[in-house]
């Protein structure tokens, strides 16, 4: 059975797509069978793994809204064990078209239920909002990964995201856990980044990943070549950091299948 991780933060431009693409490809590179699900109408994860707009007929929209078999929409990528369920502009309408659907928040869970047996990990890239697509992702997921950009207003919105998480746990998905908070675009030359990181670790303790993603130009360049960073420049610090993140997640998953309990719960941070 696959483990499904939703990558979400309603704040725009914090590194959700960069994390989704590069975590998914690093897990695939480590030998895992991975499905990347692009749940954002902007379709940046789709183009980020080299799938060009207009080069495919079916997307997540067709599975989610038109109830077509999702397997027919899945595409291969340059990495043999990384597949993608792509997004296209149609998905913009999904938020509206799903409103009247019965159990509208469960549509993505149903779609993925038809697929997950084939995969070790499913990574969902969410749009920058707490709308119906993100709610569907959080209802379908086993855990939530929150990228947080190391800047002054970084924590703005995290409280709101965690309120949503608590609400989803009460109703739609009681077993949803926190995979972790991920510091992204970390610039170790600035005091501000260090201060934000320290605050976050003070407040959220072990819910923050040990791995930190540095600000790295290779990570920003790779999408314009339609490649995850490991295929663009595997020696870069950006590539190394996402390989490290994949290891951190896989190591934790191995431990928890042996010992059972989850690592972290919101409000359960050890360090404060
Ligand atoms: N670690 C990094 N170093 C340098 N540039 C980065 C890094 N992470 C992301 N970027 C760049 O920052 C921009 C925003 O990143 P990204 O698209 O991943 O964010 P997002 O949260 O998915 O945005 P949106 O909310 O619009 O979906 C992109 O141009 C991306 O290439
Ligand atoms: Mg994005």
Image (spheres, rainbow, N blue to C red):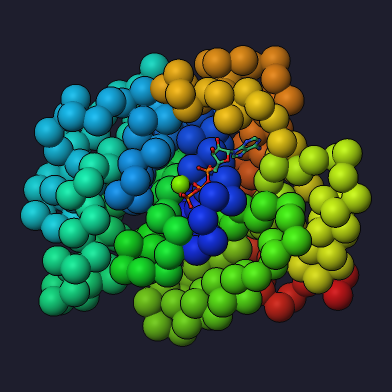
Q: Is residue 20 left or right of 104 when viewed as pictured?
A: right
**191 horizontally vs 45: left or right:** right
Task: Indicate the position of residue 203 as horizontal and vertical percent values.
Answer: 81, 71
Tell me if 260 is positioned left or right of 78 in this view.
right
Could you tell me if residue 132 is visible in this image? yes
Q: Is residue 128 above or below residue 32?
A: below
- Total marks shown come to 0
The quarter of the rendered structure image containing the C terminus is bottom right
Residue plotted at (74% across, 55% down):
151
Tell me residue 241's x, y (percent).
Answer: 71, 32
Residue nearer the viewer, 214 or 27: 214
37 up-or-down from 145: above or below: above
Query: Above or below — where is 89 with respect to 177?
Result: above
Residue 145 quadrant = bottom right
Residue drawn where x is 56% and y is 66% of the image: 177
Image coordinates for residue 163, horizontal then vertical, percent: 55, 80
Q: Is residue 131 left or right of residue 180?
A: left
Q: Position of residue 219 (x, y in %)?
A: 60, 29
At 65% from the left and 70% from the top, the residue drawn is: 156
């Amino acid at each position: 059975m696959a483990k499904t991780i939703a990558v979400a933060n309603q704040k725009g431009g914090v590194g959700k797509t960069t994390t989704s693409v590069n975590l998914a490809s690093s897990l695939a590179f480590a030998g895992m069978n991975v499905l990347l699900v692009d749940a954002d109408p902007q379709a940046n994860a789709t183009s980020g793994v080299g799938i060009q707009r207009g080069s495919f007929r079916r997307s997540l929209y067709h599975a989610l809204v038109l109830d077509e078999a999702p397997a027919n929409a899945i595409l291969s990528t340059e990495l043999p064990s990384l597949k993608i369920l792509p997004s296209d502009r149609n998905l913009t309408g999904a938020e509206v078209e799903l409103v009247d659907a019965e159990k509208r928040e469960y549509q993505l869970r149903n779609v993925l239920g038809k697929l997950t047996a084939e995969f070790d990990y499913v990574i969902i890239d969410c749009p920058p909002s707490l709308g119906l697509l993100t709610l569907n992702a959080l209802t379908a997921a086993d855990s939530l990964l929150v990228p947080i950009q190391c800047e002054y207003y970084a924590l703005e919105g995290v409280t709101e995201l965690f309120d949503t998480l608590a609400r989803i746990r009460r109703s739609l998905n009681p077993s949803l856990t926190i995979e972790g908070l991920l510091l992204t675009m970390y610039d170790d030359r600035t005091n501000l980044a260090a201060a934000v990181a320290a605050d976050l670790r003070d407040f959220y303790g072990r819910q923050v990943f040990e791995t930190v993603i540095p600000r790295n130009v290779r990570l920003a360049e790779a999408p314009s070549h339609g490649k995850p960073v490991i295929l663009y420049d595997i020696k870069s610090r950006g590539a190394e950091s996402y390989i490290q993140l994949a290891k951190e997640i896989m190591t934790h998953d191995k431990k928890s299948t042996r010992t059972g309990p989850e690592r972290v719960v919101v409000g359960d941070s050890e360090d404060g």
